[in-house]
């Protein structure tokens, strides 16, 4: 259970909730498939868990996790690698089955989207050339746990893609990236030693801290832009108040184990942002 990294699961729930809220602003609940939204949530959660296990497996067999600042991972803690790999495959399988049902309900084109999602999830740290080791992890998170999850939920709920869902996906994706940025900032020294060229390693300590602040700002701007259509979206700005402490910690030079608390705080920022934006769109859109 700990290996599934429960604290990361809000990153899978938030885009689905916001995407459903974006669909609600168009339909007011009429002709909106709640079953499709529920299946989208299953897909998102299963993919998040699968990616967590897959990363644990791939980093573990490479030895990247042998000496880390954060919580120990499964393979690095002695769990047989093949069991972690199998757990990842089971989770990917759950996402695939739920995705097939969604495709049958909405559009068979969703199968192609699902295949890309699963391939990207495994290739993050797996395979001969993991793109997470090339500084592209934030791109993956922004695209799949921001745009694809948010816009995809809106699409399966009402059968169309909306401007609001795209902008909301950018805001959600920015905060999901902020989580990864803090994680990689914490692991920067070790990653540099083992040749894991994350974006933090490539940018360096100082610029990575500015990147974190920029991503929080992007989420705030997305809420303001959406509020031009739906004033209730201003509620998303509440998250910026919650972000004050982690922003201050990152800007003041927190490092190593000090960033573990910042990671938790950033997760709360994302959760508050998603909840506020969802309720703002549904109740006062």
Image (cartoon, rainbow, N blue to C red):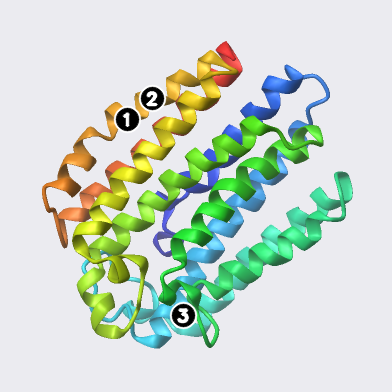
Instruction: Name the residue at 19% across, 48% down.
Output: 250
In the picture, measured across the screen, residue 16 lies left or right of residue 242, that is right
State the mark number for residue 240. 1
**Relative to 127, is 271 above or below?**
above
The mark total stands at 3
| N-terminal label among 2 and 3 | 3
User: Which residue: 43% across, 31% down?
Assistant: 221
Counting from the top left corner in percent of width and height, residue 235 is at 44, 20
150 relative position to 31: left or right: left
Real-space CA distance between mark 1 and mark 3, rounded to the nearest whole angstrom: 35 Å
Q: Neighbour class for label 2 at 10 Å: few (<14), some, many (≥20)?
A: many
The residue wearing badge 2 is 237
Q: Nearer the viewer, mark 1 or mark 3?
A: 1
Residue found 33% across the figure and 57% down from its top: 181
Q: In the image, what residue occupies the spot 62% across and 27% down?
A: 21
Residue 23 in sight here: yes
Residue at which label 3 appears: 58
Left of 229 or right of it: where is 255? left
Disc 1 or 3, which lies upstream in sequence? Answer: 3
Determine which quarter of the picture holds residue 65.
bottom left
Against 144, is 240 above or below?
Answer: above
Task: Determine whether the residue tagged by mark 3 lies in a helix, strand or loop.
Answer: helix
The local secondary structure at tag 1 comes to helix
On screen, residue 83 above or below 211? below
Marks 1/2 in contact by CB < 8 Å: the verdict is yes
């Amino acid at each position: 259970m700990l290996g599934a990294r429960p604290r990361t699961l809000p990153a899978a729930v938030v885009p689905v909730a916001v995407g459903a809220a974006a669909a609600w602003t168009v339909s007011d609940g009429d002709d909106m498939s709640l079953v499709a939204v529920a299946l989208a949530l299953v897909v998102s959660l299963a993919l998040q868990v699968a990616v967590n296990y897959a990363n644990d497996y791939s980093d573990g067999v490479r030895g990247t996790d042998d000496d880390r600042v954060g919580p120990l991972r499964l393979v690095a803690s002695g769990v047989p690698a093949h069991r972690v790999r199998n757990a990842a495959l089971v989770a990917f399988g759950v996402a695939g089955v739920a995705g097939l049902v969604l495709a049958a309900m909405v559009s068979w084109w969703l199968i192609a989207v699902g295949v890309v999602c699963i391939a990207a999830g495994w290739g993050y740290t797996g395979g001969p050339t993991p793109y997470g080791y090339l500084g592209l992890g934030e791109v993956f998170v922004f695209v799949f746990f921001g745009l694809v999850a948010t816009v995809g939920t809106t699409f399966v709920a009402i059968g169309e893609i909306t401007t609001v869902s795209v902008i909301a996906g950018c805001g959600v994706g920015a905060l999901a990236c902020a989580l990864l940025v803090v994680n990689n900032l914490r692991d920067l020294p070790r990653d540099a030693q083992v040749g894991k060229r994350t974006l933090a390693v490539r940018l360096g300590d100082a610029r990575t801290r500015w990147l974190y602040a920029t991503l929080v700002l992007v989420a705030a701007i997305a809420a303001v832009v959406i509020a031009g259509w739906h004033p209730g979206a201003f509620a998303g700005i509440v998250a910026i108040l919650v972000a004050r402490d982690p922003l201050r910690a990152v800007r003041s030079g927190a490092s190593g184990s000090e960033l573990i608390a910042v990671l938790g705080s950033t997760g709360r920022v994302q959760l508050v942002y998603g909840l506020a934006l969802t309720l703002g769109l549904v109740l006062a859109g």
